Each structure stands twice: as C-alpha cells, then as structure tokens.
Image (cartoon, rainbow, N blue to C red):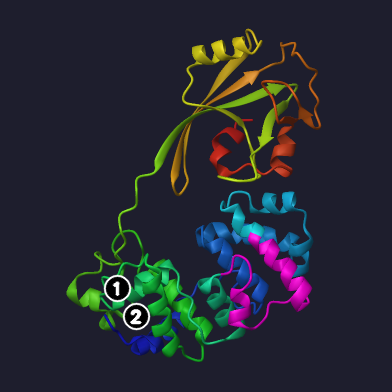
Amino acid sequence: MNYNYKDIVPYLLDWYDLNKRILPWRDQNNPYYTWVSEIMLQQTRVEAVKLYFERFITELPTIHALAAVDEMRLLKLWEGLGYYNRVKNMQKAAIILVEEYSGKMPADYEALLKLPGIGSYTAGAISSIAFSIPVPAVDGNVLRVTKRIAASFDDITKPKVKKELEEDLKKIMPERAGDFNQSLMELGATVCIPNGKPLCDKCPVMHLCNAFKTGKELMIPVKPKKKPRKVEDKTILIFSKDNRYTIRKRPDKGLLPGLWEFLSLDGHYSMLKLEEELDSKGIHNAKITSLGEAVHIFSHVEWNMKGYMIHLDNQLLKEPIVYSDSLEDELFSGCIWVSKEDINEKYTLPSAFSAYKNVI
Ligand code: SF4
C-alpha cells in the first residue's frame, strides 16, 4: 500500500522538539557516541543503556581507544548487553577506521555501510544524526509506526518491505534528517509502543494515521509467528575451594563464543544423582548446596537451569589446585580457579549465568 509520508514530517518534528528525552549521547554531535549508542540500543532498553554507555565511553572515549583495547576487557565492558559479536564487530570496524580514516567516522553512508556490523539502519542513523545526511534509519520501531500510519499489512520481517520503506522515506527526508529519524524512533518507543495498545490520544499524527482511523492499530505490524524455542535442561555446577571457583572458556564458535561459563551437565540432576556422578569421578562426601533454578531465554534457545555449589574444602583432589591458570584434571578439564573479584572485574560471564554468579 502506497502512503505518502510527507505530511507527517512537520507534526513529528514539532512533537520531537517538545518531547524528546534527554539522553547522554543525544545532541553531542559526536558520531562515535551515536554509533555506540545505536548498537547498544538494538538490544537493550534506553534506561539500561544509559549506564552501559557512560561506562563504555568513560573507558573508551575515542575510536582509537576502541581499536586498541584488549578483547577480554572489551567483552567485560559489554557484559550484560548480550550479542557479543556486535562489540567484536565494532572493534573490527574501529581498527579499519583507524587505518583508513585516521580514527574518524566518514560522513558517507556508503562507506559506513561497508564497515563490519554496520547495516542500513546503523549507517542511516549515524549519517543522519551525526552528519545531517538525508537518509532514513529504519528499525523495528520505525517499521511499526509507519506501517500503522499507512494501515499496511505488509510482513515487516521481509527484507523487501524494509527496503521499499527506506526508498519511500528517502524521497521525503527533510533537512532535519537526524531529528526526523529520531522522531519516528521516539514515537515508536514512547507512544506507538510495541506491546499493548498504542497511546493514540497522545500521538501527533493521529489525524493522519490510517490504522487509528480504521481501528486496526493492534493488528499491525504483521509478522509471521516465530518457531517455538528449543528448551534445554542444564545442571550448572560451581566447584569451590579456598574461596576460589571454577569457570571455563566457551568454544570460539557457536552460542556465546569465547565467553566464560560455569561448568554444566546436560539434563537436570537431583542432589542424589549428582552425588553419584561426583563419586564416580573420585569426589566423595563433598558438601553440596542447591543454588536453585533459573531460566535464561536466548533468541532461539531457552535454558532451564538447576544450580549446585560443590564445596571441595575437605577434598583431597588427585591433582593440586593451580590457582592462576588451567587445572588439567579429568573432571576440571579446561577450567580455571578464580576469585569472586576476578569474576566481577576480569572474566566475562554472559547474563545467562547471572543468577548463579550473584550467589558466589
Ligand atoms: Fe501509532 Fe496510534 Fe499514532 Fe497511529 S495514531 S501512529 S497507531 S500511536
């Protein structure tokens, strides 16, 4: 369905001037800040991003600093935000920016698009917000708002639908391109909200919105039903001795690549079954405490976890414990023993393990 979005522009800009939220990265005229905040906002609420953003920018205030930081520290700064490939790609892009653009972001949509981890949305956001280049920035918020305004039943998960919207918006981009893009995003975040009924009586374009006029606002946007997530049961084990705990590095490929984790067994173990398992590994009469149950939802998988702390203070292990590096033992293969401070300050454990990290 064709809709000419030109009419909504002045209403949205006026509304944005009066209603935009004050955010640490907004109105700073710093393309690096726009880049960092846009990547963080792809996965996390604005309120939470404020804290992550301040911490990240304080430690890595420039593209040069981002390019040079040790990866382990970089992942630690991203801990809690998830989607760690995004920050790894940011570092790859930063290295290119240092080598080819003297550590500055180019004021060029096509050049931005060639950088690792930067797609049409992020390139559009940086170009328009930081450099006033008249290009759209279409994300899920913008798709929802515009499709409601047009009363369009297009499937918004189709790349073709996004591409066509980008073309339509490109034709009507005003001089204040960055503010216009942000007004659409802001309307989507605060008024034309994703879950539940949009707040149409607060909307500056209500009189131009076809979904509102026809009472279809809750039917739009259209997305195909997601496949149900795969559910995996896991038993999380934290071994403890002398105030040290076992963690190990995950493989460099697959889910949560290269991050650290607590040991786990597939399936759910009762205390009795776990005692038997430990017995078979030569650990007898260890004190075991339950750490309770936790659930973590990834985009395609759900972990249902039961956790146990296994206190080894009274145990004579086959091998002496090496506190700094790896302990090569059948049971603890690949593990290192670390303090609570190490876990808090040095090693990145994904938020899937938060429930258990917090009980140490
Ligand atoms: Fe969204 Fe309602 Fe505004 Fe239409 S009138 S854009 S449905 S908030």
Quadrant occupied by the C terminus: top right
Prevalent SS, magenta region:
helix
Q: Please state the extent of the stretch shown in magenta in the rendering.
A: 89-118
Question: Of all residues shown, which one is farthest toward the top?
Answer: 285
Q: Relative to 166, say whether 260 is above or below.
A: above
The part of the image, by quadrant, that contains residue 195 is: bottom left
The part of the image, by quadrant, that contains residue 304 is: top left
Q: Is residue 102 left or right of residue 110?
A: right
Q: Which mark is residue 204?
A: 2
Q: Secondary structure at mark 2?
A: loop
Which comes sooner in the sequence, label 1 or label 2?
A: 1
Query: Is the C-beta of the residue carrying label 2 under 8 Å from the nearest atom of ligand 1?
Result: yes
- Residue at the image point whose x is 25% and y is 75% from the top: 151
Which residue type does callout 2 highlight?
Pro
Q: Relative to 5, say whether 40 is above or below.
A: above
Residue named by callout 1: 148
Which residue type does callout 1 highlight?
Arg
Q: Is residue 358 visible?
A: no
Residue 176 on image: x %, y %? 51, 88
